[in-house]
């Protein structure tokens, strides 16, 4: 297995800053850090491959009800607003158990498709890479 680690990967979930303002508040997930942010949408009844990444850790922020998330051997049914930390080299999967669901992904490390190892895949894609 190729090692795609070229940027620092946090060993645990980075702190999330909560900031209050007169109009309300915001949560700051990365402050002047090099990260990759993606909005993932999973269609009804669909799921990502069971996968792991060597070059990145991911923080998933659930935006919609109806997600099923596997992290390691644990199966979660998070609510909108829940945060899920996925360390590098940890098997994980996102699925929709209802309507389309969205998860905001903040990836720490070196985001690239080549670092994916798939353990299960509904679409018969290769074990490594895209």
Image (spheres, rainbow, N blue to C red):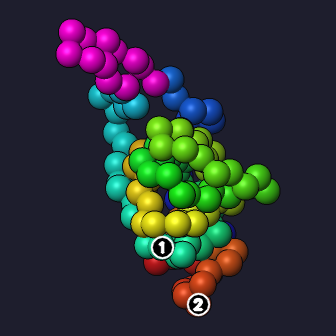
Up-down: is 20 above or below 57? Answer: above
Q: Quadrant of the N terminus?
A: bottom right
Q: Which residues are magenta?
A: 16-27
Outermost residue, left direction?
23
Up-down: is 20 above or below 112? Answer: above
Q: Are marks 1 and 2 in contact (CB under 8 Å)?
A: no
Task: Return the x and y of residue 105 as percentages of the image width and height.
Answer: 43, 50
Q: Quadrant of residue 79?
A: top right
Camera-side residue of 101 and 56: 101
Outermost residue, top direction?
22
Please indicate, yes or no, whether residue 74 appears anywhere in the rendered image: yes
Task: Return the x and y of residue 62 as percentages of the image width and height.
Answer: 48, 47
Task: Return the x and y of residue 72 as percentages of the image width and height.
Answer: 74, 55
Q: Residue at x 31, y 19 (%)?
A: 25
Q: Which residue is mark 1?
A: 44
In the image, taking residue 42 as reference, residue 74 lies left or right, namely right
Please indicate, yes or no, whether residue 105 appears anywhere in the rendered image: no
Separation of disc 1 and disc 2 at Cα?
19 Å
Question: Which of the labelled discs sits on residue 123, or is there none?
Answer: none
Tag 1 secondary structure: loop
- Sequence order check: which comes first, mark 1 or mark 2? 1
Outermost residue, front direction?
98
Q: Residue at x 46, y 24 (%)?
A: 16
The secondary structure that most of the magenta stretch takes on is: strand
Q: Quadrant of residue 93?
A: bottom right
Q: Quadrant of residue 35?
A: top left
Outermost residue, right direction?
73
Would you say residue 18 sits in the magenta stretch?
Answer: yes
Would you say residue 63 sits in the magenta stretch?
Answer: no
Q: Residue at x 20, y 16 (%)?
A: 23
Question: Which of the labelled discs sits on residue 124, or is there none?
Answer: 2
Tag 2 secondary structure: loop
């Amino acid at each position: 297995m190729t090692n795609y680690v070229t940027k620092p990967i946090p060993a645990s979930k980075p702190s999330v800053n909560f900031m209050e303002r007169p109009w309300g508040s915001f949560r700051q997930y990365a402050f002047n850090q090099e990260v990759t942010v993606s909005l993932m949408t999973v269609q009804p009844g669909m799921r990502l491959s069971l996968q792991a990444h060597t070059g990145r850790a991911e923080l998933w922020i659930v935006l919609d009800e109806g997600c099923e998330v596997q992290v390691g051997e644990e199966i979660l049914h998070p609510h909108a607003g829940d945060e899920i930390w996925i360390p590098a080299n940890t098997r994980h999967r996102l699925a929709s158990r209802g309507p389309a669901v969205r998860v905001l992904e903040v990836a720490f490390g070196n985001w690239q498709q080549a670092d994916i190892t798939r353990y299960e895949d509904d679409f018969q894609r290769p074990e490594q890479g895209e």
